[in-house]
């Protein structure tokens, strides 16, 4: 029996969660249950895996476990970009190997398309807008990134529009940026609302239990999962817990729980919206990966997301939220000087499961234990796609995308813990400093 070393514990101040529609939370599991399929983790990946397993095996009961509450954890805390395009930051043109890039594009689009279909089919109220995204730059180094990425998109034969500084206010209101690369394929969502909606429209043979954190696990021919009020025995266990997969004994020292932080304003008044100008909703990602992400939401709020911390246990730490709220205000003021009196209503953090080589894991972790872990910041599309593909593979299917994710080498090993923490924290601080005006 393995004791689970760390359990999710997110902060209580996520704006997406509080502003999304309330739902009937499913009761925690009690007693002792046996199921053929048990999925642990009800984020984008787990919801997709449970849904697809239920469709493949309509006579089997699929148990889906969530330690906290659907929409409260990492899947409900991101910036809400469902991105289609590959972006290999290690390649000179950000596309790299054209064959890998084309398959990655297909993978991302498959996840995005599944979400679009489900939102339309079930009329999920999650502010989904198929409006594209802007990748914007201020510094010369950032502009060079946009030019390089443009060359990569030409190679990949994907559409884009390069927008100069004098045209940008018509799009996003602010005069802050010097250039932007617009790509039309991204969808924007209210992530917590989307995850909640997906959970409320699962197939009938999926049983969701919330507030059921697993405390102990025993692996063998069957897996026994224990919690405070009982146990669940799984013939087949599917882990979709991202970095918490390490707490279950897998990929130890190979994933990095990195938190990033966001603030969301109150609703702008009509007069403030007129002063801002631009389109009614949009999303901007920075040319520098350590820069600031910005969104204008369909309900007329502005989101600022920047700053990072390495939390080795994967749990929130309030000191970082308090520290980074001031950085969010500074980023907001520089971008929106015409809105001096628009306060933030919410500030929160959310975890990313990262790896040093930017690779995730897909496949068998142990006999009768499987996982799709480590989305490297692409949980909306990549998590959805790999969750579905994992269920397809377990049902005996084979296709180009399954072969592609199965062949990925997975996350590589990190240095020993003291060196890892010291080096990563220094790298995060240096990256944020080096982002300059894009921070």
Image: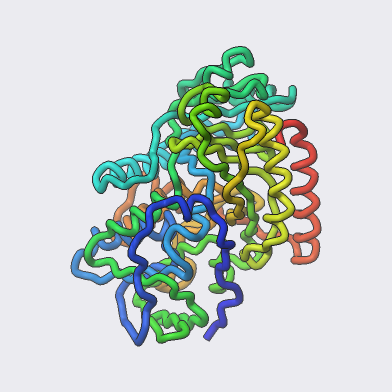
Q: Mark yes or no: residue 110 visible.
A: yes
In front of the other: 409 or 267: 267
Q: Is residue 258 above or below residue 118?
A: below
Q: At which x and y percent is residue 348?
A: 60, 54
**Residue at figure coordinates x 36%, y 67% from the top left:** 25
**Is 232 situated left or right of 207 in this image?**
right
**Is 87 situated left or right of 258 in this image?**
left
Q: At which x and y percent is residue 395?
A: 29, 60
In front of the other: 96 or 259: 259
Residue 13 location, quadrant: bottom right
Display coloring: rainbow
**Residue at figure coordinates x 51%, y 46% from the top left:** 378
In front of the other: 231 or 175: 175
Q: Mark yes or no: residue 155 visible.
A: no
Q: At which x and y percent is residue 20?
A: 42, 51
Name of the residue lying farthest toward the top: 166
Counting every numbered tag in the picture gives 0
For the C terminus, give its image quadrant: top right
Residue 200 location, quadrant: bottom left
In front of the other: 363 or 242: 242
**Residue at figure coordinates x 34%, y 45% from the top left:** 125
Q: Is residue 269 above or below residue 418?
A: above
**Residue at figure coordinates x 26%, y 71% from the top left:** 61
Q: At which x and y percent is residue 213?
A: 48, 75
Q: Is residue 11 above or below residue 285?
A: below
Q: Is residue 398 above or below residue 109?
A: below
């Amino acid at each position: 029996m393995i004791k689970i070393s760390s359990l999710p514990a997110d902060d209580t101040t996520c704006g997406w969660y509080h502003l999304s529609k309330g739902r009937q939370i499913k009761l925690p599991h009690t007693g002792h249950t046996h199921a053929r399929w048990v999925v642990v983790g009800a984020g984008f990946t787990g919801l997709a895996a449970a849904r697809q397993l239920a469709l493949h095996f309509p006579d089997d009961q699929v148990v889906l476990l969530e330690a906290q509450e659907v929409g409260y954890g990492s899947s409900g805390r991101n910036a809400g970009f469902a991105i289609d395009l590959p972006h290999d930051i290690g390649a000179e043109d950000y596309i790299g190997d054209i064959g890998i890039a084309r398959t990655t594009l297909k993978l991302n689009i498959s996840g995005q398309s599944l979400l679009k279909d489900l939102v339309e089919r079930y009329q999920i109220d999650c502010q989904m807008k198929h409006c594209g995204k802007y990748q914007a730059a201020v510094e010369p180094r950032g502009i060079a990134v946009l030019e390089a990425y443009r060359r990569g998109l030409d190679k990949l034969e994907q559409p884009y529009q390069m927008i100069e500084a004098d045209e940008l206010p018509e799009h996003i209101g602010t005069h802050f940026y010097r250039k932007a690369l617009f790509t039309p394929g991204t969808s924007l969502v209210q992530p917590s609302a989307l995850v909640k909606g997906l959970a409320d429209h699962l197939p009938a043979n999926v049983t969701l239990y919330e507030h059921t954190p697993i405390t102990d696990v025993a692996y063998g021919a069957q897996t026994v999962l224990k919690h405070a009020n009982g146990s669940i025995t799984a013939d087949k266990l599917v882990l979709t817990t991202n970095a918490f997969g390490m707490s279950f004994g897998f990929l130890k020292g190979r994933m990095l729980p990195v938190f990033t932080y966001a603030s969301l304003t109150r609703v702008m008044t009509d007069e403030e919206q007129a002063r801002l100008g631009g389109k009614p909703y949009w999303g901007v990602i920075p040319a520098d990966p350590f820069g600031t992400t910005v969104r204008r939401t369909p309900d007329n709020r502005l989101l600022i997301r920047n700053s990072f911390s390495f939390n080795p246990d994967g749990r929130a730490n309030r000191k970082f939220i308090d520290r980074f709220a001031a950085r969010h205000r500074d980023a907001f003021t520089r971008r929106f000087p015409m809105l001096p009196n628009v306060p933030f209503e919410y500030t929160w953090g959310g975890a990313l499961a990262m790896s040093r080589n930017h690779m995730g894991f897909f496949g068998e972790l142990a006999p009768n234990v499987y996982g799709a872990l480590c989305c490297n910041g692409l949980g909306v599309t990549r998590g959805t796609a790999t969750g579905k593909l994992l269920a397809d593979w377990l049902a005996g299917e084979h296709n180009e995308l399954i072969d592609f994710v199965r062949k990925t080498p997975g996350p590589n090993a990190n240095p020993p813990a003291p060196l890892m923490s010291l080096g990563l924290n220094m790298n995060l601080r240096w990256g944020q400093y080096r982002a300059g005006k894009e921070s």
